[in-house]
Amino acid sequence: KAGVTQTPRYLIKTRGQQVTLSCSPISGHRSVSWYQQTPGQGLQFLFEYFSETQRNKGNFPGRFSGRQFSNSRSEMNVSTLELGDSALYLCASSWGGFSSYNEQFFGPGTRLTVL
Amino acid sequence: EDQVTQSPEALRLQEGESSSLNCSYTVSGLRGLFWYRQDPGKGPEFLFTLYSAGEEKEKERLKATLTKKESFLHITAPKPEDSATYLCAASTGGSYIPTFGRGTSLIVHP
């Protein structure tokens, strides 16, 4: 069974640019959640999508947005990049999402560097 | 505010030297306590879910336990390949969103 895949794996952008990250969940999983991981803040929840609907959102500015497609694939967009957005962005998928207390399976992450 | 605190931040062990990692939580209405292992440059790998106080789960050299205020990850006779960062997360009945601790970085020397 293929795991969660994320593309690209590495990305270098400059301040003010925007970026789109992609996540393909495990086949059959309907929930995709996104996290930002930094040495200073640890793993922080961004948002969760289930069947194309955003079910939960973390405490991040509106520059961070996402969407989910009918095949459960998800994209995350960050506009007007800031230096502080440099982080490892992780995507996780699960069958039923948070409310089902299913275990989440994480992808390898996208390492974003903002210069 | 929900909080999850892990200790110690870093732990060095000799191969075969058993120890425990701690995850204390202050959340309202715990629904699930999760343990993950994360290797450098990779995403977290799911280990266990615990749902109620008194519950225990085992996998190879790892055993997770849960009380009303904390969870422990016991590592018995660790090997160098157990070296990783171990993360715990607590999910509550309100938002269901898991709150993660900062992790414990474990290094096992041969």
Image (spheres, coloured by chain):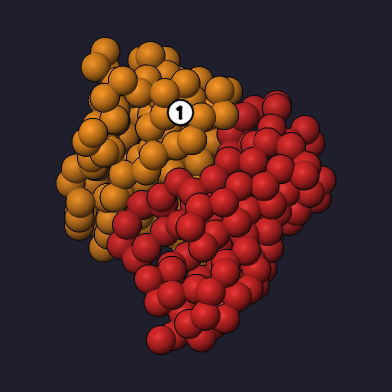
Does A70 sit left or right of B9 as displayed? left
A53, B77: nearer the viewer: B77
Does A99 sit left or right of A21 as displayed? right
Name which residue lies at 54% across and 45% down: B48
Name which residue lies at 58% across and 23% down: A99
Q: Which chain is red?
A: B
Q: Position of residue A9 (x, y in %)?
A: 20, 51
Q: Position of residue B105 (x, y in %)?
A: 51, 71
B9, A75: nearer the viewer: B9
Does B18 sit left or right of A50 as displayed? right
Q: Is residue A92 visible?
A: yes
A1, B84: nearer the viewer: A1
Name which residue lies at 29% across and 30% down: A26
Name which residue lies at 41% across and 86% down: B110
Looking at numbered disc 1 in the image, what kind of residue is underneath it?
A: Glu
Q: Quadrant of residue A33?
A: top left
Q: Is residue B101 visible?
A: no
Q: Position of residue A5 (x, y in %)?
A: 23, 40
In the figure, the shade used to draw chain A is orange
- Report which residue position mark 1 lands on: A48
B86, B97: nearer the viewer: B86
Q: Position of residue A16 (x, y in %)?
A: 28, 49
Quadrant the C terminus of chain A occupies: bottom left
Say what secondary structure mark 1 lies in.
strand
Chain letter of mark 1 equals A
Q: Quadrant of residue B95?
A: top right
